[in-house]
């Protein structure tokens, strides 16, 4: 499952990041690392971008960027 498939309020753990390019490096610099827990906070009115909570801050990602993040749901 990828991050872009989650719904508002769902929590997940980052399993891996897909790809090997500058976007992957940027996501890692923003704190999206393996084993990090995230929560989907909401979506823009047209559905893109999405806002997630990562550690103690909120991060907005486009759905195409979120599709590069493999996650597993948390209970």
Image (cartoon, helix red, strand yellow):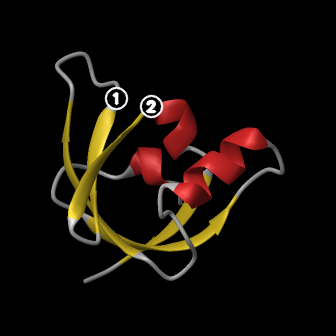
Q: Residue at x 55, y 38 (%)?
A: 65
Establish if 53 lies above or below 55: above
Establish if 34 lies above or below 2: below
Q: Position of residue 17 (x, y in %)?
A: 66, 61
Q: Where is residue 25 in the image (x, y as percent from the top left)?
A: 69, 52
In the image, farthest residue toward the right: 20
- Image-quadrant location for residue 54: bottom left
**What label sits on residue 64 in the rendered view?**
none
Q: Where is residue 56 in the image (x, y as percent from the top left)?
A: 21, 69
In the image, farthest residue toward the front: 29
Question: How many other residues sit within 10 Å of disc 2, few (<14), some (14-19) or many (≥20)?
Answer: some
Question: How many other residues sit within 10 Å of disc 1, few (<14), some (14-19) or many (≥20)?
Answer: some
Q: Verify CB contact (< 8 Å) between mark 1 and mark 2.
A: yes
Left or right of residue 2: residue 18: right
Quote the CA–CA distance across marks 1 and 2: 4 Å
Establish if 67 lies above or below 56: above
Q: Which residue is drawn at 60% across and 60% down?
A: 28
**What label sits on residue 62 in the rendered view?**
2
Residue located beneath label 1 in the image: 49
Left or right of residue 47: residue 36: right
Establish if 6 lies above or below 42: below
| Secondary structure of the residue carrying numbered label 2 | loop
Q: How many marks?
A: 2
Q: In which quarter of the image is the C terminus?
A: bottom left
User: Which is more N-terminal, label 2 or label 1?
Assistant: 1
Q: Which of 49 and 22 is in front in this view?
A: 22
| Secondary structure of the residue carrying numbered label 1 | loop
């Amino acid at each position: 499952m990828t991050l872009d498939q989650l719904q508002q309020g769902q929590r997940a753990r980052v399993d891996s990041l897909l790809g090997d390019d500058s976007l992957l490096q940027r996501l890692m610099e923003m704190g999206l690392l393996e084993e990090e827990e995230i929560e989907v906070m909401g979506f823009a009115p047209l559905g893109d971008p999405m806002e997630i909570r990562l550690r103690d801050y909120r991060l907005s990602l486009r759905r195409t960027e979120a599709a590069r993040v493999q996650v597993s749901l948390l209970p």
